Image (cartoon, rainbow, N blue to C red):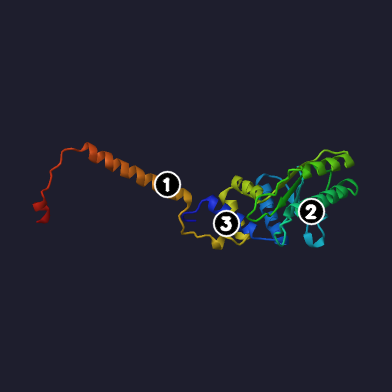
Amino acid sequence: MSGMDKYDYIEAIVLELKSTTDINFQVKVGEILKRYYTFCNKTYEMPNSSGGDDKNDGWVVEDQLFYQIYSPQQMKNSLRKDMQSKFSEDFSKLLDLIYTHGKWGKGLKKFVFIVNTIDRNLPHDSERYYKLECEKLEKKYGEKFEYEVTNVAYIRDILEIMEINDLISLSTILRVRSIIDHNAISAKMMYEVIDVLSGMVQEKIFSNETNKSYDRISSEKKLV
C-alpha cells in the first residue's frame, strides 16, 4: 500500500463504475451499498435480478429505503427523457407491488434513483418532473414519499465515509485494485514533500541572510 491513500481507491472505483453499463453497473453499485450499510450496522438486501427484481434493485430494511440503479447501454442525446420514463415506470410499479400486493415489508419512505451519466452531469429538471410525478403517486396511495435522483456522485460520497480497509476490499471485489499503481506517489504525499522542501529552502535562505561573517575567496584562489 506504498504511497496510497483512500482517495486513490475512491477514484479508481468511481472510474470503474462510470465505464460500466447495464446489469454490471447495478451489481457493482449493489456491492458498494451492501458494504456501506454493513459499515452502518444496517441490513441491505439485493434481490436476485435473474429471478425478476420487482423493480427493487436493493433496499435498506430498517429505513424502508429503496434503490433503482440504471446505466444505459448507450448514452443517447435523449438521456433526460429516458431517465424520466425509467423513473416513472419503476417507481410506479414498485409502489404498486408494495401497497397493493404487500411486497417488501411495511412500506416505502424514500426512493433513490441512481443513474450512470458517465462523464456528464445530471440533465436539468427545470419543469420539476420528478417532484410532480412523486406528488401524483403520493395522492394515489395516500402516503408521503421522499425521492432522490442522482448519479455516481452519490456513491463517491458514500465511499468517502468508509474506512480504507473497506475501500481496499471493494477495489478487489470490483477488480480495480490491479490497475492502481501502488508505486505512485499520492497527492497527499506529494503535498507533504513539497511542504517539507519549501520549509528547508526558506530556512536555508534566511540562514544565509543572517550569517554575515564569512571569508570571501578570491577568484585566483578558486582556480587553484
Label 3 secondary element: helix
Badge 3: how crowded within 10 Å, few (<14), some, or many (20+)? some
Judge whether residue 103 can be spotted in this image.
Answer: no
Residue placed under numbered mark 3 in the picture = 12
How far is disc 3 from disc 1 in space, using C-alphas?
22 Å
Which residue is at a point 49% across and 59% down the rendered structure image?
A: 182
Residue placed under numbered mark 1 in the picture = 192
Query: Which amino acid, mark 1?
Result: Glu
Ranked by sequence position, the earlier of labels 3 and 1 is: 3
Q: Disc 3 or disc 2, which is closer to the eye?
A: 2
Whole-percent x, y for residue 27 in the image: 71, 58
Label 2 secondary element: helix
Q: Disc 2 or disc 1, which is closer to the eye?
A: 2
Whole-percent x, y for residue 92 in the image: 84, 49
How far is disc 2 from disc 1 in space, using C-alphas?
47 Å
Query: Which amino acid, mark 2?
Result: Lys
Image position of 72 (left or right of 16): right
Judge whether residue 200 can be spotted in this image.
Answer: yes
The quarter in which the C terminus is drawn is bottom left
Residue placed under numbered mark 2 in the picture = 86
Q: State if disc 1 and disc 3 touch (CB < 8 Å).
A: no
How far is disc 3 from disc 2 in space, using C-alphas?
28 Å
Query: Which amino acid, mark 3?
Result: Ala
